[in-house]
Image (tube, helix red, strand yellow):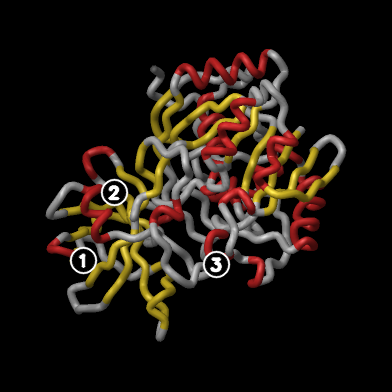
Amino acid sequence: MNRQPILVSTKDHEVLSGLPRLSFTLPPELEAGEPPEARGFSRDEVRLMVSHIATNQVVHTQFRQIADFLEPGDVLVINTSGTLNAALEAIRADGTRYELHLSTHLPADLWVVEMRSYQENNEKTTRPFYDSKPGESFALPEGGRVTLHTPYAPGNSRRLWVASLDLPTQLHPYLERYGFPIRYSYVKEGWPLSYYQSVYVTEMGSAEMPSAGRAFTPELLTRLIARGIQIAPILLHTGVASTEQKEPVYEEYYRVQEPTARLINTARAAHQRIVAIGTTVVRTLETVTDTSGVTHPGEGWTDIIITPQRGIRSVNGMLTGLHEPHSTHLAMLMALSGREHLKVTYAEALRKGYLWHEFGDLHLILP
């Protein structure tokens, strides 16, 4: 197995500043603040917007009808990474309470972490905390500690840190007992970790939910497979985003095994549709797909940014949530569909009152 990325792009701030933008105003009422189950729906009853790049046709339906838009031989590529209880209460030496977000587990048992402070008079909402110092240590539950070593982000930003954990037990049991899912200001209440998992998780490791696949149910997957839709797994452990700063994701661990690469290459040669279930799948496959369009098995770390200038070689369709204005995810979608198609679809989503974020509605982009 190839352990090095074939295509890796450095997160250069000049690249980021040159990304094409899609400007729109996202009304607060369209930010999904709770899972559909809390609104009286099942997972697969969220809304689905299906758009066709070639014609700009847009269809509005329900996610459980997705099979109506797929054909035998289509390949759906899923990310089987599971979401951790990656948030922990942390206490500074002066007694001030903070929230620690675990992002990425690095080699040598180091971590990329984010410290967040509570908003004044609101202990349910946090924001990035930039005043930590190198060498500073915070107390964690049950005698645990986190020690910050050096800023991680480009430009010496102090949002993300390389850190070490000293825990009284093994990581996963500790997080199961003392941690809770990462959430941002639009999610007003805490929800159990089960609400942040897809039904096809095989390996825990993501700080935040790879949310595009959340709406699948075992019954729906069974119907798709019975119809001849092929399912191909990859793994990418997602790190923390920053909805406040609109920053890109940083280096993340991925793995693509040989059967998945072979299935994708066979489908591509047969001119079948390859549909990424989420932006994490696109980042992973673009990391291991060469300039001639051949996808290779691989394992390693990727910091690739997908732009319209670079293009997409690995897939020709995508299922994704709805993304905030100016996010780098929108640049990836433009690379797949073009800016004009995205303008049409996002105008439709706003007009129809689709819900944004991980608990919101979904968008299926087809050739």
Q: Are marks 1 and 2 in contact (CB under 8 Å)?
A: no
**Residue 95 relative to residue 297: left or right:** left
Q: Where residue 138 is drawn, which disc sits there?
A: 1
**Image quadrant occupied by the N terminus:** top left
Q: Residue at horizontal 44%, vertical 22%?
A: 257
Find disc 3 in the rendering and name its residue: 33
Q: CA distance from mark 2 to mark 3?
A: 29 Å
**Image quadrant occupied by the C terminus:** top right
> Does label 1 or label 2 sit earlier along the sequence?
2
Mark 3 lies on a secondary structure that is loop
At label 2, the amino acid type is Trp
- Looking at this rendering, what residue extends furthest in the bottom direction? 121
> Does label 1 or label 3 sit earlier along the sequence?
3
> How dense is the environment of label 2, judged by Cα within 10 Å: few (below 14), some, or many (20 and up)?
many
> How dense is the environment of label 3, judged by Cα within 10 Å: few (below 14), some, or many (20 and up)?
many
Q: CA distance from mark 1 to mark 3?
A: 30 Å
Find disc 2 in the rendering and name its residue: 111
Q: CA distance from mark 1 to mark 2?
A: 14 Å
Q: Residue at horizontal 53%, vertical 49%?
A: 211
**Residue 211 relative to residue 363: left or right:** left
Q: Are marks 1 and 3 in contact (CB under 8 Å)?
A: no
Percent of width and height locating residue 130: 37, 68
Front-lying residue, 305 or 239: 239
